[in-house]
Image (cartoon, rainbow, N blue to C red):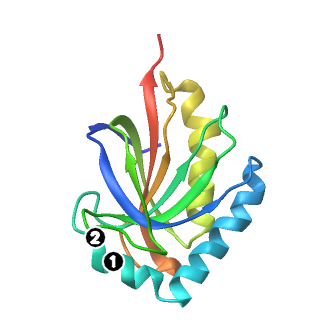
């Protein structure tokens, strides 16, 4: 699998968020509906106007861990502007990230890449999953021919 490892400083995101289920298969239904709603009601366009820092692109950010009951998914951008309702802010902590490029028709292409990362790459990579958010960076706006990256927080296995 094509990937790179990068350390990134903390960055702030602004966006809309909804709770997620612990069952990943249910989230593969919830998240695309969120994106459809955000595209149709103008949220994505409003967020693009707030994007003013790295990473550039519309972000899908999944926040939560096995110990937490509060799993949330953000559709967001990296930005420094103050957020007002209905938008929320979150600071993505500094991490080392395994970053996987991808392209194809979404949401299927990105969901398939995420499954491959967890089942194929992670067990043999020399890295383990760190306790942080998963990030999808959408580099192009066309869901039928999207270019994207999947960021997974990782730490070296000891």
Q: Position of residue 11 (x, y in %)?
A: 30, 49
- Please indicate whether residue 98 sits to the left or right of residue 86 in the image: left
Q: Position of residue 156 (x, y in %)?
A: 42, 20
Rate crowding at label 2 as few (under 14), some (14 to 19) or many (20 or more) other CA atoms within 10 Å.
Answer: many
- Please indicate whether residue 9 sits to the left or right of residue 99 in the image: left
Helix, strand or loop at mark 1: helix
- Please indicate whether residue 139 sits to the left or right of residue 136 in the image: left
Is 2 placed above or below 122 here?
Answer: below
Is 108 placed above or below 43 here?
Answer: above
Marks 1/2: CA distance?
5 Å
Q: Residue at point 44% right, 80% down? A: 44
What number is the disc on residue 51?
2
Q: Residue at point 50% right, 47% down? A: 134
Is 106 placed above or below 19 here?
Answer: below
Q: Nearer the viewer, residue 103 or 5?
A: 5
Rate crowding at label 1 as few (under 14), some (14 to 19) or many (20 or more) other CA atoms within 10 Å.
Answer: some
Helix, strand or loop at mark 2: loop
Tally the numbered discs. 2
Residue at the outermost top position:
158
The residue beneath circle 1 is 48
Q: Residue at point 70% right, 61% down? A: 28
What number is the disc on residue 126?
none
Is 69 placed above or below 53 here?
Answer: above
Q: Position of residue 141 (x, y in %)?
A: 41, 79
Badge 1 vs badge 2, beta-carbon distance below 8 Å? yes
Q: Nearer the viewer, residue 144 or 38?
A: 38
Tell me where residue 105 sits by quadrant. bottom right
């Amino acid at each position: 699998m094509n990937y790179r490892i990068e350390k990134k400083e903390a960055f702030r995101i602004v966006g809309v968020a909804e709770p997620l289920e612990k069952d990943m298969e249910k989230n593969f239904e919830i998240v695309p509906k969120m994106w459809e709603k955000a595209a149709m009601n103008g949220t994505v366009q409003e967020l693009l106007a707030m994007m003013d820092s790295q990473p550039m692109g519309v972000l899908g950010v999944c926040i939560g861990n096995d110990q937490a009951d509060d799993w949330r998914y953000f559709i967001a951008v990296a930005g420094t502007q103050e957020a007002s309702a209905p938008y929320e802010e979150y600071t993505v902590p500094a991490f080392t990230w395994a970053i996987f490029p991808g392209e194809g028709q979404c949401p299927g292409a990105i969901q398939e890449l995420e499954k491959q990362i967890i089942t194929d790459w992670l067990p043999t990579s020399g890295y383990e999953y760190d306790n942080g958010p998963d990030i999808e960076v959408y580099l192009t706006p066309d869901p039928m021919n999207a270019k994207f990256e999947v960021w997974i927080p990782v730490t070296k296995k000891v």
